[in-house]
Every structure is written in C-alpha cells, then in structure tokens.
Amino acid sequence: DAAERASGTMYLRDKIAHAEASGKHGSQNPVYVELNITIVKLVRAADVQDRLACTAILRALIDIDMLEDTQKTRITSQVKTLISGNNVTVCSEAVDIFGKLVQKKWAVIMSSVESEVSRCLEWLASDRSEVRRITALRFIEVLCVGAPTSLYSYIPKILTSLSQPVRDHRLEMRIAAASTLGACLDLVPMQDQTTRNPWLNYLFEELDRVHKFGTVEGFHAALLICQELVLHGGMYMQS
C-alpha cells in the first residue's frame, strides 16, 4: 500500500546516500546499476503493484543531488512511460513525480513541458480512455503550479478543453476538471483584468450553457464552475 511504498522509498534513499558516500558516483555506481535494471523490468510490467513499486524507486532517485544528465534523461523517460499507462493510481503517482522534477528545474524536464501540455490537450480532446483524460487534468494542474510561465499561453485552449470533463458522467472527472480550472485561474493576477475578464466571461457563459443541459451532471458542472468563479473571480462576480 501507499505507506509501504513510502517506507520503501525512505529505505532506498538511505541506501543510495550510503552508496554515494562510498566514493563511486554517477551511473556506474553499483546501486544505480541495480536500481535501473529493476526499473526497466517494472516500468512496463502488467501488474499494477510492480509499476507502483517502480514509482517508489523513482521517488528515491530524484532526491539525489549528484545525478548525471544521462540519469536525469533516463528517469524523465521512465516517468513519462508511467504517465502514459492505463491505471489511474500509477499515472497519478507518476504525474506527482513529474511535478517534483519541474520544481527541481531539471533542464530535460523544463524543455518538455510544452510538449506535455500539448499531449494533455490531445488526450482531453480525442482520447476515449478515462484514465488518460483524468491524468491529463491532473497533469495540467501540476504544471500550472510548477511551470506557470510555460502554461500561460495555453490557458484559453485549456479552458475550452474543460467543457466536456466538467460535465462528465463520472464524479471524479468533474471534480478533477474543476480543480484544474481553479489552478488555471490562479495563474493570472487579480489586477490583470485585461487578460482575466475574457476568461471569466467565457466561464460565466459556460456556466449558463451547462446548466441548460438539465441533467444532474450539468447542474453539478454549473455549481463547480460557479464555485471557481467565486473563489478566483474577485470583483468580477460582484459586478
């Protein structure tokens, strides 16, 4: 379970730190070699628990300060592979790891942020997989927090892409879409009304539109959008 994975991550961090102290750094350190072999076996495993174990190993590795660029590139690729999976728990863990890498400003990560946003938008627009769509929502939310400058220009496209998931028949999808909406609105300062108001106008119109569907999902979507407008709209809602 999650507690055991967290415990395993802590154990691996200690093991890696001890290996670093031995004096042999980089990808040739026997511990790194062993862990990478294990990751390669687990990252595409059919068993969900194996892939979750892979996320625990990756969490331990990313906290090491002396990783070489080749190791960072390999880890980034492995995290992306997990994000593209078919299990929502594994994908969520991998998205969280990607977010931590964004915070660390790894060059290989920062250079791929825009392509990952494009992939998320593609999943939201055309992918029938529930897992990929909810992963895309969580991924965008993480990137809004960690890489706001890179996300800024994509906000109009993201807002329109939320129209369907915010009224999806699955409650989890609707909640995730609303959370992503709030993260997007957080990117623009309240004072920047020139940018904010067109977005807020669109959302207010969207609120009215989904309400007219007359379904439980539509009513809930309207409430979720209204909640985000109240939380992030400032004086707009009062006017």
Image (cartoon, helix red, strand yellow):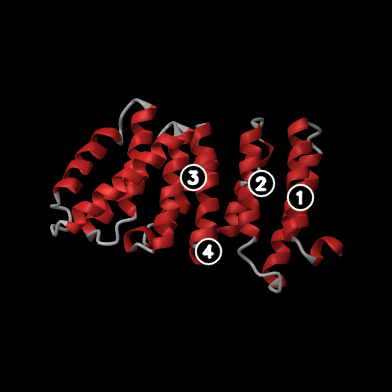
Residue that mark 4 sits on: 148
Q: Amino acid at mark 1?
A: Gln
- Closest to the camera, between mark 2 and mark 3, is 2
Residues under numbered marks 2 and 4 in contact, where contact means CB atoms less than 8 Å apart: no
How crowded is the residue under tag 1: few (<14 C-alpha within 10 Å), some, or many (20+)? some
Task: Give the SS element for disc 4.
Answer: helix
Q: Amino acid at mark 3?
A: Glu
Q: Quadrant of the C terminus?
A: bottom right
Residues under numbered marks 3 and 1 in contact, where contact means CB atoms less than 8 Å apart: no
* Structural distance between the alpha carbons of marks 2 and 1: 9 Å
Tell me where residue 57 appears, x and y as whole percent.
31, 42
The residue drawn where x is 14% and y is 47% is 30
Q: Residue furthest top?
A: 47
The residue drawn where x is 54% and y is 59% is 145
Res. 68 visible in picture: yes
Residues under numbered marks 2 and 1 in contact, where contact means CB atoms less than 8 Å apart: yes
In the image, 120 versus 101, the foreground residue is 101
- Closest to the camera, between mark 3 and mark 1, is 1
Q: How many marks?
A: 4
Q: Is residue 29 above or below residue 53?
A: below
Q: Quadrant of the N terminus?
A: top left
